[in-house]
Image (cartoon, grey):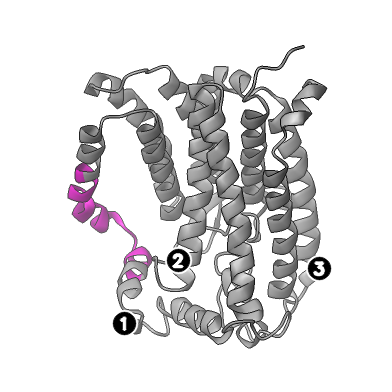
Amino acid sequence: MNRRMLRYVDWALVAATLGLLVGGGVILFSATRTFPDPWVFVKARVLHAALGLGVLVVFTAVDYQALGRLWRPLWVVTVALLATVDVIGRTAQGAQRWIPLGPLSFQPSELAKLLLVITLAKHLDGHRELTTLRQLVPVLVHAAIPILLIIQQPDMGTSMVVAAILAAMLFAAGTPLRWMGGLTAAGLAAAPFLWGALHDYQRRRLLVFLDPSLDPLGAGYALIQSKIAVGSGQLFGKGFLQGTQNLLHFIPEQHTDFIFTVIGEELGFAGALVMLALFAVWLWRAGAAAMQAKDRLGTLMAVGILTMIAFHLFINVGMTVGLAPVTGIPLPFISHGGSALLAMLAGTGLLLNIGMRRKKILF
């Protein structure tokens, strides 16, 4: 990477990312401090953050066009990793999503999101027009195989993220609205069949989203307690490390899927607003990278990464306050989880990469 490129580093994006990373570490400490061994999570967070920042630097330095040229082998790696989960994957909480690596574990579906952004962007960049089924079908198959492998784990939340990424990138690539509408109609028509394919716990989650009182001590419990925790924080919260719902473990998965409840209860609306402001800056700069990219490939990659983070944010925050069904989607940069954090920091590095090359650099 030429030193002159450093002139074009998006420092606002860097600052927002670091703010979320540090703030997430503080909130994670509060969420886990009453666990039997909270320092396990603190040490894991430090390790994940250090590795993630290293990955961010690598994805910033390597030209994104060079990554795009590797799209075929990267797609094969994506599918192979997802298929490997079925063979040697570790099962936890009824899902087989992790590959054991000694004392650690790796979740391929998190990496698959980023790799699919890269490979889809290059695939779409090779199709200047998407006006016929012959042009559109290969792109749909490109995403459908990984999505089906993710659904099989089962991981409905991640499959929804990939579907959202596909839709946004198709739109950004100039797919005619009639085809976008046709794909939406096909998805709605398939809804009854998808309902039958869902596991019982997934169907219960959707039903209690509509009415948590249907199963207040089962599938609706987390949603009810989450809304109580967020609501009790009011404007300025109960104070850092003072959240009773958090301290007494009323919230299931308070350090992963429901970590936003800790923010809402302890820091209140004001604390949540600060977090959302940092995300707003992050998304604003991601949008700027997409608009200012020097080529179509960079624009498509930036749109995919922006969609990934925005969808995670909307669904995770939405499910804690009853605006979205409960899914296993982490809050970006904040929830505990090494695989997700590494993928999101790598995505941030790719955005910086695209932004740094938005102008012609003289060597």
User: Residue 274 location in percent, x, y?
Assistant: 64, 66
The residue beneath circle 2 is 318
Q: Amino acid at mark 3?
A: Trp
Give the mark nearer the N terminus: 3 vs 2.
3
Q: Local crowd at mark 1 within 10 Å, few (<14), some, or many (≥20)?
A: some
Is 38 or 116 nearer to us in this picture?
116
Q: Is the stretch drawn in magenta largely helix, strand or loop?
A: helix
Q: Amino acid at mark 1?
A: Leu
The residue sitting at 76% across, 57% down in the picture is 44
Mark 2 secondary-structure assignment: helix
Distance of mark 3 from mark 2, alpha carbons? 29 Å
Task: Identify the residue at the far top of this view.
Answer: 363
Image: 99 above or below 296: below
The residue beneath circle 1 is 214
Mark 3 secondary-structure assignment: helix
Left or right of 127 in this view: 10? right
The residue beneath circle 3 is 39
Image: 185 above or below 265: above
Res. 85 visible in picture: no
Give the mark nearer the N terminus: 1 vs 3.
3
Looking at the figure, which quarter contains the N terminus? top right
Which one is in front in this view, the residue at disc 2 or the one at disc 1?
Answer: 2
Mark 1 secondary-structure assignment: helix
Q: Which residues are magenta?
A: 185-204
Circles 2 and 1: CB atoms closer than 8 Å = no
Q: Local crowd at mark 2 within 10 Å, few (<14), some, or many (≥20)?
A: some
